[in-house]
Image (cartoon, rainbow, N blue to C red):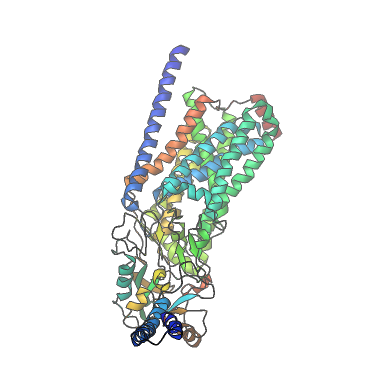
């Protein structure tokens, strides 16, 4: 912009080497900054005033054959990102590692379990106030402002994915407000997704067992993998069309 | 004793009763405040057992509230004068018990301060939200029904109001049963039979409560219940107890037919510790077999004390039954991966323990306190004691 101004001045006035130098410097500086500015804009993700789009359906594919028993990188990353710890009966656990053993074959698996972000979520159906809701891009969330803490969603969830905040919480992550007396669950790290980042658990998984992406985009890696390999929906009998898919169980 | 002396003693007894019940209510309110300020960590409820003792009390009161109204319905809708005389007391108990139950339910919320949110934000797909509408409607309809019964000018509308209340109460209990019936994922629930089962449970619990309160009122006033009326009521009670047993049988038989439910049935019926004991000893022996034996016994069944005792046993059985349904149903772990052994830090695959604490018990009991306090005061202020017209009743007996 400043370059244009300088050129218009040059047309009218006699060429001044000092001015010319300044003009070229401004142009080069502008060119140098431009990609950074563009990148900053891209990294900023969806603007706050733009609603989530139903063209996207966020989902995850978890390969249990790559998930090591005893590894809980995803669990600790989730706790760090969303501000919770502790594993007593009253502590929140948005994600947990489940160890499975097939009683007939003896085959064992280890996998992370969290909110499955159903297309037809029972928690949303039963919530009396509408605090449990599904965002247009498929993420199931709790509106902390209208949750009355009745815990009916916890009764309804087939995956035991929800937790109730049993006591006062300190040292919260400002991006992830939580409150005593309300129900909460995995948000797919919505605060990261909206900034074009991956959920904390996916990022932390050292064995690359977790793949995050848009289930609606046929060209996304997750869609390609689901199209070509056998994947499972947990409790598929309930016909909830979950957003979290598993491989290897 | 002269009348004046009796009146004085009676008045003192009334205030003593009101004070005692007031203390029970205060203890409950104090507990609720303690639970709200400290969080539910001070209760025995966890992320595994999310509904605890307060819900057992609340569901009992709500179910019994709709059931106790049956006495009025039999009078108004089915035109039986003997029950008509009991209709005002039945309507009053219905309102009082529902108020007690809802207070407990509301005070157990994680955010009871957001009651206004629950009253202004409705998700109409939620049976819980529909219940809020049914409960509020129940108060209104029963209040109108009481008005038509107590105001001479309105007597003509009593039958219609009674009919509306009867239909409404059936819908209300269907909705209460469906709170559990609509839980697709849990082995204990997810069954259409729960809705009619809750209706029949309400018939039985409600009539038992009515008989207890009525016996108490008669004793308080030095009156004796007519043997014919007692016989009618105890026969009806026995029928309801048998019907609850029938539905329990159907519920468990259906589950036993499905291989996927065997583990759950083994838990409740054989290996569930406190739940198995409460089922067999509490619900079946104390709540079903003993009262049936007393009520149907040719000699005992005619004694008002024995009928009173069996009503108490039925209430004990009711609490056992609801404890098994509500807590037992949650104690059995969710089968997220059928056919697999599951374990995790979140207590997957293990039986969940529940140890209720004093505050939640006091909160639950205060619901009963609220119901009884409201009833005691209303009975005193208004005229709710059943007044039988024996000429009508004897005509009724002859026509039956």
Q: Residue furthest front?
A: A14
> Which residue is at 51% across, 28% downward?
B379
Give whichever of B189, B374 is nearer the camera: B374
x, y percentage for residue B386? 57, 28
Residue A244 located left or right of residue A76: right
Residue A190 located left or right of residue B235: left
x, y percentage for residue B380? 50, 25
Give whichever of B279, B18 is nearer the camera: B18
For the question of whether residue B269 can be seen, the reply is no
> Which residue is at 34% across, 80% downward?
A67
Up-down: is A118 above or below A14?
above
For the question of whether residue A30 can be seen, the reply is yes
Up-down: is A114 above or below B267?
below
Question: Which image quadrant: the C terminus of chain B?
Answer: top right
Q: Quadrant of residue B1?
A: top left
x, y percentage for residue A14? 41, 86
> Which residue is at 50% across, 64% downward?
A122
Give whichever of B192, B45 is nearer the camera: B45
> Which residue is at 44% across, 53% downward?
A148
Give whichever of A30, B356 is nearer the camera: A30
Q: Quadrant of residue B202?
A: top right
Q: What is the count of numbered marks?
A: 0
x, y percentage for residue A211? 41, 81
């Amino acid at each position: 912009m400043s370059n244009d101004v300088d050129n218009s001045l040059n047309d009218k006035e006699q060429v001044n080497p000092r001015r010319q130098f300044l003009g070229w410097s401004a142009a080069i500086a502008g060119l140098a900054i431009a990609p950074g500015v563009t990148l900053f804009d891209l990294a900023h993700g969806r603007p706050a005033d733009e609603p989530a789009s139903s063209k996207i359906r966020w989902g995850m594919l978890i390969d249990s054959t790559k998930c090591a028993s005893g590894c809980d990188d995803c669990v600790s990353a989730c706790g760090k990102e969303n501000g919770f710890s502790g594993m007593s009966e009253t502590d929140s656990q948005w994600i947990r590692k489940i160890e499975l053993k097939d009683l007939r074959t003896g085959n064992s698996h280890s996998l992370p379990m969290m909110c499955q972000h159903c297309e037809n979520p029972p928690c949303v159906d039963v919530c009396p106030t509408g605090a449990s809701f599904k965002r247009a891009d498929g993420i199931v969330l709790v509106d902390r402002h209208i949750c009355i803490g009745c815990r009916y969603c916890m009764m309804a969830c087939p995956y035991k994915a929800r937790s109730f905040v049993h006591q006062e919480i300190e040292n919260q992550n400002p991006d992830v407000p939580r409150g005593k007396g309300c129900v909460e669950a995995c948000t797919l790290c919505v605060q990261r997704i909206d900034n074009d980042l991956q959920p904390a658990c996916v990022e932390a998984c050292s064995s690359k067992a977790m793949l995050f992406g848009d289930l609606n985009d046929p060209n996304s890696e997750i869609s390609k993998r689901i199209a070509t390999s056998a994947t499972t929906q947990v409790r598929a009998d309930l016909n909830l069309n979950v957003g979290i898919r598993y491989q290897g169980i | 004793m002269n009348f004046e002396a009796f009146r004085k003693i009676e008045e003192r007894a009334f205030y003593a009763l009101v004070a005692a019940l007031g203390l029970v209510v205060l203890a409950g309110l104090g507990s609720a405040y303690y639970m709200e300020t400290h969080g539910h960590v001070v209760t025995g409820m966890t992320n595994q057992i999310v509904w605890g003792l307060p819900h057992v009390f609340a569901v009992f009161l709500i179910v019994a509230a709709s059931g106790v109204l049956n006495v009025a319905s039999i009078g108004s809708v089915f035109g039986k004068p003997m029950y008509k005389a009991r209709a005002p007391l039945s309507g009053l108990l219905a309102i009082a018990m529902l108020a007690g139950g809802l207070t407990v339910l509301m005070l157990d919320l994680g955010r009871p301060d957001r009651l206004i949110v629950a009253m202004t934000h409705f998700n109409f797909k939620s049976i819980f939200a529909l219940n809020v509408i049914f409960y509020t409607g129940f108060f209104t309809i029963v209040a109108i029904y009481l008005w038509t019964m107590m105001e001479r000018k309105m007597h003509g509308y009593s039958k219609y109001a009674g009919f509306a209340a009867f239909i409404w109460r059936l819908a209300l209990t269907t909705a209460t049963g469906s709170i559990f019936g609509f839980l697709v994922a849990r082995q204990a629930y997810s069954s259409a039979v729960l809705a009619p089962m809750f209706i029949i449970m309400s018939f039985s619990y409600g009539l038992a409560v009515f008989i207890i309160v009525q016996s108490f009122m008669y004793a308080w006033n030095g009156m004796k219940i007519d043997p014919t009326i007692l016989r009618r009521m105890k026969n009806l009670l026995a029928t309801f107890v048998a019907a609850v047993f029938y539905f329990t049988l159907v519920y468990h038989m259906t589950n036993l037919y499905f291989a996927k439910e065997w583990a759950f049935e083994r838990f409740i019926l054989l290996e569930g510790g406190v739940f198995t004991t409460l089922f067999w000893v509490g619900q079946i022996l104390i709540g079903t077999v003993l009262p049936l034996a007393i009520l149907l016994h040719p000699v005992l069944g005619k004694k008002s004390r024995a009928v009173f005792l069996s009503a108490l046993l039925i209430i004990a059985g009711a609490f056992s039954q609801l404890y098994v349904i509500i807590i037992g149903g949650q104690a059995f772990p969710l089968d997220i991966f059928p056919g697999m052994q599951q374990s995790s830090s979140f207590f997957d695959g293990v039986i969940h323990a529940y140890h209720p604490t004093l505050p939640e018990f006091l909160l639950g009991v205060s619901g009963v306190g609220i119901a009884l306090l409201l009833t005691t005061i209303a009975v005193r202020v208004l005229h709710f004691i059943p007044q039988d017209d024996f000429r009508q009743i004897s005509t009724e007996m002859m026509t039956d």
